[in-house]
Amino acid sequence: MSRIDWTSHTGRALHGSVRVPGDKSVSHRALMLGALADGTSHIRGFLEGEDTRATAKVLQQLGVRIEAPADGERVVHGVGLHGLRGTAHALDCGNAGTGMRLLAGLLAGQAFDSTLVGDESLSRRPMRRVTEPLARMGARIDTQDGLPPLQVRGGQPLRGISYTLPVASAQVKSALLLAGLYAQGETEVIEPHPTRDYTERMLAAFGWPIAFEPGRARLSGGHALRATDVDVPADFSSAAFFLVAASLVPGSALRLPSVGLNPRRTGLLQVLRLMGADIRVENERESGGEPVGDLVVRHAPLHGIKLPEALVPDMIDEFPALFVAAAAAKGRTVVRGAAELRVKESDRIASMANGLRALGVSIEEAPDGATIEGGVIGGGNIDSHGDHRIAMSFAVAGLVADAPVHIGDCANVATSFPGFTTLANGCGFQLT
């Protein structure tokens, strides 16, 4: 991947309607369940990102025919629960932590061996949190001291377990539920805090009997998945950058249509409102089992808060954008209970703290969060550490900084938000 750097300049008021790409989490899961289903599934609104394309390529290596009749569309010809075919080639997940962790669960129940690999960033991300509970189900997965590559041994009989997650993680929960499709008996996952329930909702949409409520999901093996059509909502995590940007830049008014509003995903919406943001939800509806609505955001002065820890699991991907909002708000914002940020694509607490300090913001790190003193954001040079959400967050910071913000190593934005610069500049960003 060639290096891409950005410079973000002070922006004018943001206006217009911004349709952000399809939800990455839903796109990954629609591909996987469509592949294991009986029949043909049509996916519309599919995220054309490198992460989701990597998952599609892995499934194609395993014998699934996937067509792309147009941008944002996929036609998945399911092979049934036991129809995947093994390959001697490594299965490259690219930068997709979701892809790798969910595929580990899915492949644990197959008759053949598989090797999951990833790029340099993914190869540093911890995998024991998913391989250890899968091992309790009977899976055999070898790692490199807890890191990728993952060597998944085939032909292992799986048994259902009841497992309480030590740390709330939708990815680990989803991996166990996917392994549970192949397990003898019942698989139950209990969470310390409820996480996003995309996998549960989509399993139900594909016809698999599953019982779930916030913080708990339960299913048994031995059923079948039926092909279904999936309309992927716009990704809330991608919308988050525009929610923060329009809140901060005076005179702004943006509409973000058809955004997924899964309650386990929209913690940032509640937090921004607590900070004084003016965000309305219009045209609420349901699509493919997922709540969807249009978000209308207007500029409003923000103030610092003590973040309610109960909202942390519902906004784990949105913290970089929140840190920028806090840096531009009036007063102090205190974040705790977010240790998960240390093991994302980068150590997001350290990356955001170092970046904000470089822009003159006062921020004090804690093991599980930070204390941010809001005020004036200056210009400066930022290293995104190849983390797409860090890069986009500092693009937002540049809109309200008193000098240009130079952001290095932004190529990975294509993993989750292809076309970000075009869309951003179209509504008022000054990103070069």
Image: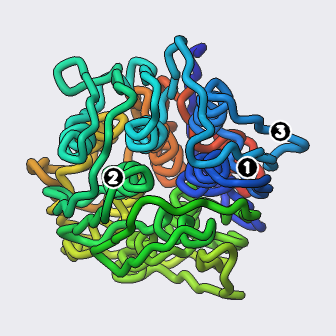
Identify the image quadrant of residue 136: top left
The mark tally for this picture is 3
- Badge 2 local density, few (<14 within 10 Å), some, or many (20+)? many
Mark 3 or 1, nearer chain start: 3
Left or right, residue 424 beside residue 245: right
Residue at 23%, 18% (x, y): give it. 144
For label 2, the residue is 176
Identify the image quadrant of residue 158: top left
Residue at 51%, 44% (x, y): give it. 392
- Badge 1 local density, few (<14 within 10 Å), some, or many (20+)? some
Residue at 38%, 30% (x, y): give it. 155
Vertical relation: 220 (above or below) 129: below
Where is residue 102? Give x, y as percent.
Answer: 43, 44
Left or right, residue 175 beside residue 424: left
Colouring chosen for the image of the structure: rainbow
Please tell me which residue lies in front, 1 or 155: 155
For label 3, the residue is 67
Kindly identify the amino acid type of the residue bearing the numbered disc 2: Leu
**Of tags 2 and 3, which is closer to the observer?**
2
SS at mark 2 in the image:
helix
SS at mark 1 in the image:
helix
Kindly identify the amino acid type of the residue bearing the numbered disc 1: Leu
Where is residue 320? Give x, y as percent.
Answer: 37, 51
- Badge 3 local density, few (<14 within 10 Å), some, or many (20+)? some
Residue 423 marker = 1
Kindly identify the amino acid type of the residue bearing the numbered disc 3: Glu
Where is residue 119? Give x, y as percent.
Answer: 45, 20
Q: CA distance from mark 2 to mark 3?
A: 28 Å
